[in-house]
Amino acid sequence: MNAPLGDPPRSLTGLHVVDADGAKVGKVQQVYRDDATNDPEWITVRTGLFGMKETFIPLAGVRRTGDELHVPHDRETIKAAPRIDADGHLDPSEEAELYRHYGMARPDAPHPGDAPDPGGESGTGGTPDPGSGGTANPGSGGTANPGSGGTSDPGGTSGTGGKPLG
């Protein structure tokens, strides 16, 4: 999957996340990359009372407008996402749980009729980018890359966990 609108993934940190209904959800804290492809795949957003919890949101279908990331999920779906620690590594089983919650197929999941993977589940998960911090990059504003169509590639190639950007 490509970074939304061609933006460097680090420039996503600190952006305001807006849900499908136009309600603000929180700010991007971390961006997780796929271990196999190194492409951005997930963001975390502080939610809950006093913003004490980080919630994972997939980047598939996200579009950027100025300092906002518009996600194709409503606030209630985001807040009800499985609680997974955003402390380093998103393993494949956690990622599968998140994909199920958001009603999405994992990009690397076998399709009905495909032969099973004889080597077991592929991918190794990922780790967060300790350098992403959670503060906005003051130079990250601007406009979308007009060549990207305003969405990330929902048919990404791996989906095998993620690590924050570095």
Image: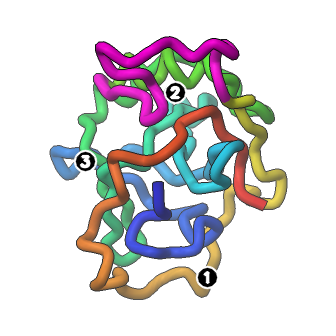
Residue pointed to by mark 2? 49
Give me the residue at 35% from left, 55% from top.
Answer: 153
Give me the residue at 44% from left, 41% from top.
Answer: 58
Q: Earlier in the sequence, mark 1 or mark 2?
A: 2
Residue pointed to by mark 3? 23
**Residue 69 at x, y percent in the picture:** 37, 60
* Quadrant housing residue 93: top right
Residue type at the position of mark 3? Ala
**Residue extending farthest left:** 21
**Residue 115 at x, y percent in the picture:** 44, 15
Give me the residue at 30% from left, 56% from top.
Answer: 70
Label 2: which secondary element: helix
- Does residue 44 sit above or below 84 in this rendering? below
Label 1: which secondary element: loop
Left or right of 62 on screen, residue 135: right
Left or right of 20 on screen, residue 158: right
- Residues rendered magenta in the picture: 103-122
Residue pointed to by mark 1? 138
**Nearest to viewer (mark 3 / mark 2):** 3
Left or right of 114 on screen, residue 23: left
Label 3: which secondary element: loop
**Residue 125 at x, y percent in the picture:** 71, 31
Q: Residues within 10 Å of mark 3 (few under 14, many from 20)?
A: few
**Nearest to viewer (mark 1 / mark 2):** 1
Left or right of 59 on screen, residue 64: left
Q: In this view of the protein, which residue sits in the foreground, 123 or 31?
A: 123
Q: CA distance from mark 1 to mark 3?
A: 23 Å
